[in-house]
Amino acid sequence: MEYDFPLYRPPSEADSLILQITLGCSHNKCTFCSMYKTKKYRVRTPLEIEKHLSWAKEYYPFASRIFLADGNVLAMETEQLKSIVERLYKEFPALERVTAYAGPKDILGKSEKELQALREAGLTMLYMGVESGSGRVLENVKKGVTPAQMIEAGQKAKQAGFKLSCMIISGLGGRELWEEHAVESARVISAIDPEYFALLTLLVEEGTALYAQVKRGEFLLLRPDEVINETKLMLENIELSRCVFRSNHPSNYLSLKGILNQDKDQLLEVLTKAQQSQIRLRPEGWRLL
């Protein structure tokens, strides 16, 4: 089976069968992202999808989890995506869930009825990159939506019955906007109140617009200790019902996990110890190793 590389999926989908229904990202303008810069967004043809599903059924007939790639499957026409999801449950007898990335603009572009139809068909969870709750940061990184639209998209997905996993990128505001990034990200995530919340740390990749900004001195990166300060400020301001929180991605300087807000005090205690150098941070060269 031929995949169109590079191929990406969330860390929690490590054991999932990946079906590449679309190629690239329909937005593909974020200054920090290099994931799909070599691809032009398109939906695979019916023949390509048919061959893809035939291969998957032959080699992974008992897949229990399927992740739909690439970056913006939800940008597809609703009926086509709904038909594919329904077919997956018929042809994979052990299938328990189907998940996908979902850009906020794609969620907002669907009606409530369309989202509910996709959820009822068996698309169970969406991964939405919030990145930041700051309007200035979102504008700087060309995310294409405002904080208010981000909240609207998250709440709309939840109201349609989806489980929602949201991501924030530590350090994305740089030294100029780190406090605003922390406080406003906490506000937006609290307003969405997702089932899952992941906190990654910025990695600047060569070839991105952000990389060029860093090289020109226009964007000042946070030091590891400053990332810890930002993380602590974010968690101090966050209010969630019962959210699985993870900050244990290889990009992070410090591994954190818990339930928010249930474990908030314990997490803040760990961050305080890190500020006092009682806990060693992951060395820069070890990130993503």
Image (cartoon, rainbow, N blue to C red):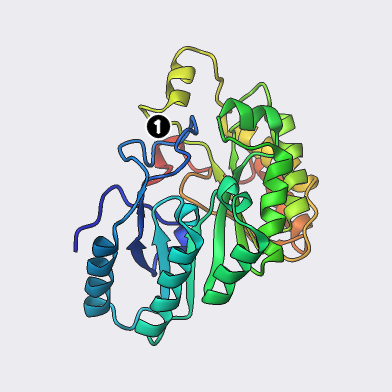
- At 72% from the left and 50% from the top, the residue drawn is 152
Q: Can residue 92 be seen in this view?
A: no
Image quarter of residue 187: top right
Residue that protrudes farthest toward the top in the picture: 216
Q: From what the image shows, is residue 126 above or below residue 105? A: below
Q: Position of residue 234 (x, y in %)?
A: 73, 43
Q: Can residue 144 be seen in this view?
A: yes
Pick the front one: 17 or 267: 17
Q: Where is residue 247 in the image (x, y as percent from the top left)?
A: 58, 52
> Total label count?
1
Q: From what the image shows, is residue 21 above or below residue 26? A: below
Q: Is residue 109 left or right of residue 187?
A: left
Q: From what the image shows, is residue 176 above or below residue 255? A: above
Residue that protrudes farthest toward the left in the picture: 1
- At 52% from the left and 45% from the top, the residue drawn is 252
Q: Position of residue 145 (x, y in %)?
A: 63, 37
Q: In which quarter of the image is the N terminus?
A: bottom left
Image quarter of residue 48: bottom left
Circle 1 SS class: loop
Residue on which the image places disc 1:
205
Image quarter of residue 45: bottom left
Mark 1 is surrounded, within 10 Å at the Cα level, by few (under 14), some (14 to 19) or many (20 or more) other residues, namely: some
Q: Is residue 150 left or right of residue 126?
A: right
- At 63% from the left and 50% from the top, the residue drawn is 108
Pick the front one: 13 or 112: 112
Q: Give the amino acid type for the residue marked by disc 1 in the picture.
A: Glu
Q: From what the image shows, is residue 57 above or below residue 110? A: below
Q: Position of residue 62 (x, y in %)?
A: 33, 83
